[in-house]
Image (cartoon, rainbow, N blue to C red):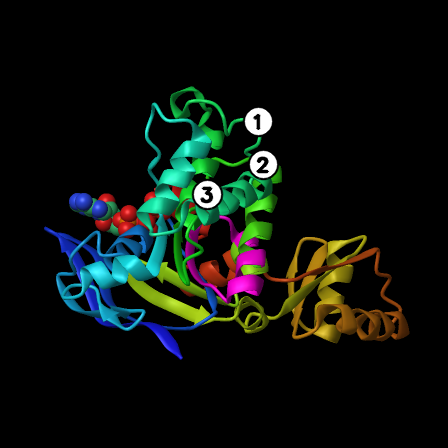
Amino acid sequence: MTTIRTRNLTKHFGAVHAVQGLDLDVAEGELVALLGPNGAGKSTTLRMLTTLLTPTSGTAQVAGYDVVSDQAAVRRSIGYIGQGNGAGHNQHGRDELVTQGRVYGLSRSLAKTRADELIESLDLAAVADRRVSTLSGGQRRRLDIAMGLIHAPGLLFLDEPSTGLDPQNRANLQEHIRTLRERYGTTVVLTTHYLDEADSMAERVIVVDHGRVIADDPPARLKAALGDRVTLGFASASEATSAVTLVGGSCEGTHVSVPGDDGPALVPSLLRDLDVAGVKVLSATVTQPTLDDVFLSLTGRSLREGASK
Ligand SMILES: Nc1ncnc2c1ncn2[C@@H]1O[C@H](COP(=O)(O)OP(=O)(O)OP(=O)(O)O)[C@@H](O)[C@H]1O
């Protein structure tokens, strides 16, 4: 069943066309990653879906409710972890979590149980009894995440959840999200700059650039569309040139690059053909495409370059 549906969803800030005609369908239980460089429109999309921003035009339904005419119902149905800090300053971390659970209508005992689970899984034990104002940036980030998860929402929006976390805490967070999905079948929409995170967690990656969707597919399919590349090394440029006439591909100095659907399976046949022709291969490496290569092939720029603009 579709739990998020947008049609021609658009947001302009004056002359800035932040989101341009987004059509998005997310099924219940899916984990979808929005990937794109800074300024692509990811946060704006999330902020419209969570009712924090009103669309300029177009429609969006979340959990069956319209994000403009049914804001309260949308908010009750979702959890949202934005980029800023949500926790107050003077409360202790654990109290803040329990209070947040109570705001969402949990009983005190359930709020406490959930708070304890989150403190454990997000490695907050050492800081749960400290005042929020004394926590480090990464600790506050984890507390914010715990606050967004306390009511175990069926639909969870995470805006760059991993930014500011160290690798261990990124792994903890990913594990927690996996558990949530297994236990509650939670639908998750997240934005990320981490290609590996989108690759390993998301069933579907939606690549956004300049407010438009430029690709929408499972990560494996996006990468498979590009194919692999086998790079062969030779002792001289002339040997590399002869290799190209035998096996195809393109030559750069002493190296030849040959595209193929299945790089590892291609290597033995390339080596055999070149051996038969008496051309000695010094090295062979297989490169499989990353999501950054997908972005590069779609836009002519790297996500990293886009991020620095
Ligand atoms: N409140 C606002 N007023 C004016 N312009 C805005 C506002 N919010 C966002 N923008 C602009 O809209 C565009 C999209 O921004 P958005 O934050 O959605 O991008 P993003 O993909 O989430 O980027 P990032 O990866 O940096 O979070 C940018 O050009 C941004 O400067």
Dot 3 falls on a residue whose secondary structure is helix
Q: Which residue is mark 2?
A: 123
Residue 36 horizontal side relative to residue 265, left or right: left
Q: Return the x and y of residue 236 as percentages of the image width and height.
A: 77, 53
Three-letter code for the amino acid on which mark 1 is drawn: Ala
Instruction: For marks 3 and 1, give the CA distance.
Output: 14 Å
- Work out which quarter of the rendered image holds the N terminus and state it: bottom left
Using the image, determine if residue 182 lies above or below residue 193: below
The stretch in magenta equals 179-197
For image coordinates 38% across by 46% down, the residue present is 101
Three-letter code for the amino acid on which mark 3 is drawn: Ala
Taking the magenta stretch, the answer to whether it contains residue 187 is yes
Q: Which residue is more in the foreground, 125 or 1?
A: 125
Q: Return the x and y of residue 43 as percentages of the image width and height.
A: 31, 51
Asked if marks 1 and 2 touch (Cβ < 8 Å), the reply is yes
Q: Which residue is mark 1?
A: 126
Dot 1 falls on a residue whose secondary structure is loop
- Work out which quarter of the rendered image holds the C terminus and state it: top left
Q: Return the x and y of residue 242 as percentages of the image width and height.
A: 75, 67
For ligand 1, tell me if the residue under mark 1 lies within 8 Å: no
Which residue, as the protein is rendered here, is positioned at the far top?
Answer: 134
Q: Which numbered disc covers residue 146?
A: 3
